[in-house]
């Protein structure tokens, strides 16, 4: 009777082991199938990501920029003003500059006269307020002590010195005949400035540039996907025309002697 009792128990254990092995086998097969499907998805994503990066690399951007327009302008408060991130501040700055241009250009008000009148008005008001405070039982005005720090002026002077030295170096290289392309570009730019200067004075030119900085960047940021293809076509056409001009004119102009001495 004991032997008969042990045989069913052995059969039950072997049956349970088979069921457990079957479940483990199904789990391993399902996990392997899931890992295979995940691997296939990752393999499919790699070519798509590579394609996206290659497409982004091939997109033409105006002036060869690789960063957003906001970062090109410095990414700080000046960029926020030019790109109208805060419309109230941008409108206030634009309105203030417009008022100054109208005051000095259209009404022909002079800067020295304006500064003198403002100082006369402020000093007269503060003087009368300080002396009348004892009669009207009010506290006199608190005039703050203004002291300009030294470091910002030193930094501005140092940066200005670096830029002036760089400009002098560029002008020296151009005058020595080392770079014919840069020479033609600078001469063309100076000629355009002379023509524009004959149309308007410096204040009006400054106001026009300020207006362009407040309108063109924000319009370009909004419609850059439409502007960049047109700019790419324009750049290609300009390069073609420049190649023809270089072959017919610039290549026939003799180079400067300094470049030949440097090569020797």
Image: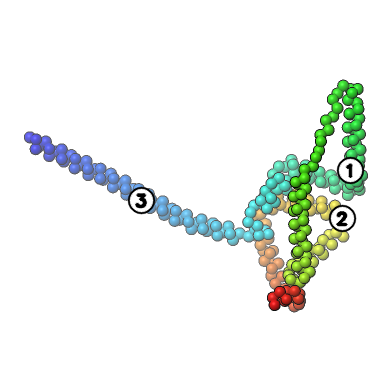
Label annotation for residue 216:
none
Residue 113, relative to residue 185: is it above or below? above
Residue 173, relative to residue 164: is it above or below? below
For the point 22% across and 41% down, which residue is it?
16
Residue 221, can we see it? no
At label 3, counting other C-alpha atoms closer than 10 Å, the crowd grade (few under 14, some 14-19, many 20 or more) is: few
For the point 88% across and 25% down, which residue is it?
133
Write down the residue under mark 3: 33
Q: Nearer the viewer, mark 2 or mark 3?
A: 2
Residue 90 figure quarter: top right
Mark 2 vs mark 3, CA separation in Å: 77 Å
- In this view, the residue in front, 254 or 235, is 254
- Marked residue nearer the N-terminal end (2 or 3): 3
Expressed as whole percent of the image width and height from the top left, the position of residue 109 reads 91, 46
Residue 14, relative to residue 261: is it above or below? above
For the point 70% across and 77% down, which residue is it?
264
Expressed as whole percent of the image width and height from the top left, the position of residue 57 reads 58, 59
View extreme (left): residue: 1
- Marked residue nearer the N-terminal end (1 or 2): 1
For the point 73% across and 76% down, which residue is it?
261
Write down the residue under mark 2: 201
Expressed as whole percent of the image width and height from the top left, the position of residue 168 reads 78, 62
Residue 124, can we see it? yes
Write down the residue under mark 1: 115
Q: Nearer the viewer, mark 3 or mark 1?
A: 1
- In this view, the residue in front, 202 or 172, is 172
């Amino acid at each position: 009777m004991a032997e008969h009792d042990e045989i069913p128990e052995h059969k039950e254990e072997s049956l349970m082991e088979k069921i457990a092995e079957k479940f483990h086998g199904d789990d391993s097969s399902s996990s392997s199938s899931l890992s295979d499907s995940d691997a296939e998805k990752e393999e499919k994503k790699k070519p798509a990501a590579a394609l996206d990066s290659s497409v982004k690399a091939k997109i033409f951007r105006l002036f060869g920029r690789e960063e957003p327009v906001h970062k090109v302008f410095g990414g700080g408060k000046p960029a926020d003003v030019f790109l109208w991130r805060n419309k109230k501040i941008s409108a206030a700055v634009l309105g203030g500059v417009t008022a100054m241009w109208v005051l000095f250009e259209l009404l022909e008000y002079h800067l020295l006269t304006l500064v003198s009148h403002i100082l006369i008005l402020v000093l007269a008001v503060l003087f009368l307020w300080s002396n009348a405070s004892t009669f009207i039982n009010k506290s006199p005005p608190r005039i703050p002590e203004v002291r300009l720090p030294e470091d910002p002026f030193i930094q501005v002077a140092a940066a200005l010195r670096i830029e002036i030295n760089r400009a002098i170096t560029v002008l020296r290289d151009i005058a020595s005949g080392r770079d014919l392309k840069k020479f033609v570009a600078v001469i063309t730019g100076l000629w355009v400035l002379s023509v524009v200067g004959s149309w308007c004075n410096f204040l009006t030119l400054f106001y026009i540039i300020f207006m362009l900085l407040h309108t063109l960047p924000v319009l370009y940021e909004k419609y850059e996907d439409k502007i960049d293809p047109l700019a790419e076509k324009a750049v290609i056409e300009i390069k073609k025309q420049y190649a023809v001009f270089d072959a017919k004119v610039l290549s026939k102009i003799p180079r400067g002697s300094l470049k030949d001495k440097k090569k020797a």
